[in-house]
Amino acid sequence: MTASTVNPSNAAELKTLNEQLAHVAYADGFQPTAKDASLFTSLKSNVAASTYPHVARWYTHIASFTEAERKQWAGAAAASTSAAPAADDDFDLFGSDEEDDEEKQRLTEERLKAYAEKKSKKPGPIAKSNIIYDVKPWDDTINTDDIEKAVRGIEMDGLVWGAAKKVPVAFGIIKLQICCVVEDEKVSSDALEEAITGFEDLVQSVDVVAFNKV
């Protein structure tokens, strides 16, 4: 799918997007891009989870990012907008044309100082990571759907589960590959692995396939 927008009333477009998001966490794979920001804007509101579960999961996840973070994905255009002090705080850094040069300089320095102080108090972006796990069952008698249900039942503040798929291993054994996005300060990979391996009747082992900063 190459389009960066989706008509929320077009069932065909939503179906195509839903099928794509069944295998990846984001529109272009496992990293958020400008396409995710554009798609999010075009959808405007969540869709029916019963009809498009993967789109609904993706929309909820993208909505967990701040507008500023989504703008960063869009590239230089958003960066140049956020870099302009006048657009953010509506400052006239150079005063009116009627003031003399000395007064202009004083006002400019005061306003630049006030702007810098205000910007320094704003919280920085939340550090997040995208993790993909391989979850292996004990044998071929274990249903991978049961493993996925158990894993998705793990709830932590700062954790969002993403797409999952079944991957054949050998001798009829099928492992679960599942991705998630975590807030680094709230959720550690070690804590997640410990929680998953806690399902001792289902899970033999857990391996990290990919670990990327978002």
Image (cartoon, rainbow, N blue to C red):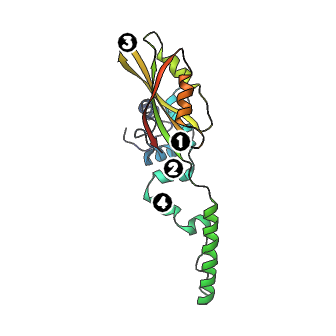
Above or below residue 194? Residue 30 is below
Residues at marks 4 and 2, CA–CA distance in whole angstroms: 11 Å
Residues at marks 1 and 4, CA–CA distance in whole angstroms: 19 Å
| Residue 168 relative to residue 81: left or right | left
- Tag 2 and tag 1, C-beta contact below 8 Å: yes
| Residue 203 relative to residue 168: left or right | right
Question: Which numbered tag is attached to residue 135?
Answer: none
Give the farthest residue toward the left.
170
Badge 1 marks a residue whose secondary structure is: helix
Tell me the residue that label 1 is attached to.
Answer: 62
- Tag 3 and tag 4, C-beta contact below 8 Å: no
What is the crowding at mark 4: few (fewer than 14 residues within 10 Å), some, or many (at least 20)?
some
Image quadrant occupied by the N terminus: top left
Residue 208 location in percent, x, y? Answer: 44, 32
Question: Which numbered tag is attached to residue 79?
Answer: 4
Q: Which residue is drawn at 54% across and 21% down?
A: 149
Give the farthest residue toward the top.
141
